[in-house]
Image (cartoon, rainbow, N blue to C red):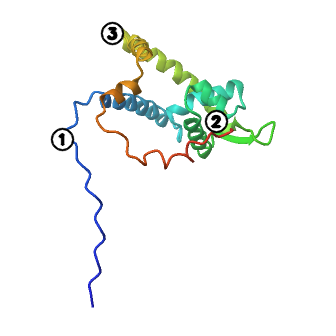
Amino acid sequence: MTSPTPPASPPERPMPERLDAVVWRPLTLLLRDLDDQIATLYATAGIEGVKPRYSLPLVWLDQDGPLTIRTLADRCDVTHSAMSQTVSAMRDADLVRTVSGPDARTRLVELTEHGRSLVAYLVDEWNATEAAVRELESELPYPLTRVVDDLHAALARRSFRDRIAARMSLTPPEDAGSHDAAASAPDAS
């Protein structure tokens, strides 16, 4: 009787010799922390299941709803895919529902009574957050809004993608794009 053959181990991937100094991560962590603090404010107020990223779409839906996912994505300046995920999460939290649109291909997103009941609080939080950012800016030698404007101007001269690609030493694996074709098909919502 022979013993079973152990499974072949995957080929070893070369480990990077080192990672350069981390510049990007502190910014992403700061933004996540700020969102987490807003979420804590919601939880303290007894508002469960609401994330800061829901505020703007909920306010748009209250103001102009029902709206398509595409319209919400455009108004919130996010991708259709990101808004579709947000709408799904908001639906799970009973903040919105989807209903048939004017034709068979269109689905509209509208507020539930629960979602509508939170809008005034979310608008108040939004305005308070903007005021807090202005206060924070007054304590800094270089305002955040100026940083953002300067970054936009620099990226208009040369995109972030181009800046990253110019510094990469490896080319993509040969089959890198073959798995994404179905996932990138447009959605008519």
> Dot 2, how many residues are within 10 Å of its Cα: few (below 14), some (14-19), or many (20+)?
many
Taking 111 as reference, is 4 left or right?
left
Query: Which element is circle 3 on?
Result: loop
Q: Quadrant of the C terminus?
A: top right
Q: Residue furthest left?
A: 17
Residue bearing mark 3: 142
How far separated are the C-alphas under marks 3 and 1? 36 Å
Which x, y percent locates residue 20? Answer: 22, 32
Amino acid tagged 2: Gly
Query: Which element is circle 2 on?
Result: helix
> Dot 1, how many residues are within 10 Å of its Cα: few (below 14), some (14-19), or many (20+)?
few
The mark closer to the camera, 3 or 2, is 3
Residue bearing mark 2: 115
**Can residue 119 be seen in this snapshot?**
no
- Circle on res. 156: none
How far separated are the C-alphas under marks 1 and 2? 50 Å
Amino acid tagged 1: Glu
Residue bearing mark 1: 17
Taking 164 as reference, is 14 left or right?
left
**Which residue is more in the foreground, 67 or 61?**
67
The mark closer to the camera, 1 or 2, is 1
Q: Residue at x 81, y 36 (%)?
A: 102
Is the residue 30 above or below the residue 185 in the image?
above
> Dot 3, how many residues are within 10 Å of its Cα: few (below 14), some (14-19), or many (20+)?
few
